[in-house]
Amino acid sequence: MTDPQVSQPKQLDLLQGTLDLLILKAVSLGPLHGYGVLLRIQQISGQSLIIQQGSLYPALYRLEHQGVIASEWGESDNNRKAKFYRLTVAGRLRLADETARWNRMSTLIGQFLLATPATLGEEV
């Protein structure tokens, strides 16, 4: 009998460098306040990716400083003042670039993991 936590982990660890990509994708779907970004990532990932606020807010600050997202103050659903983030033109370009890079890398890793002595032309 297999351990259900091993075969289907509830929460996955993020690979280094993917948080920015996830934030850019989440914000590309519409303006969101910080906590909304967390919720959108959880929603899209089927609750498998949980981003800690201690990681999210420095990343939002960094992305805003880089000019790929912009913010403005607004009112959240619970009538609180909140900073809402949206993609800039530079952010759309970066999202497209990062998405293409991720797709290339995941294809390469997939090919690598399928390698066998036979696919390398070696005798078994």
Image: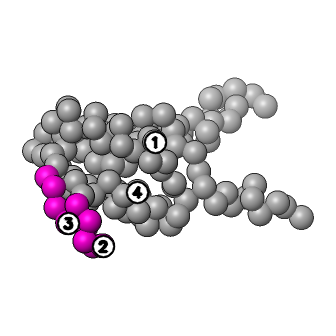
Of labels 4 and 2, earlier in sequence is 4
How many circles with numbers are drawn on the protein? 4
> Rounded to the nearest whole Å, what is the CA distance between mark 1 and mark 3?
22 Å
Residue linked to disc 1:
54
Residue 117 seen anywhere in this rendered image of the structure: yes
Image quarter for residue 84? bottom left
Q: Name the residue carrying label 3.
A: 75
The amino acid marked with disc number 4 is Leu
What amino acid is labelled 1 in the image?
Gly
Earlier in the chain: of badge 1 and badge 3, it is 1
Where residue 44 appears, as percent x and y from the top left, is 42, 64
**What residue would you read off at disc 4?**
38
Q: Amino acid at mark 2?
A: Asn
Residue 78: which disc?
2
Name the spot of residue 112 as percent of width and height, x first: 57, 35
Q: Quadrant of the N terminus?
A: bottom right
Is 50 placed above or below 47 here? above
Mark 2 is surrounded, within 10 Å at the Cα level, by few (under 14), some (14 to 19) or many (20 or more) other residues, namely few
Q: Judge the density around disc 4: few (<14), some (14-19), many (≥20) Cα neighbours within 10 Å.
A: many
User: Would residue 3 be counted in the magenta stretch?
Assistant: no
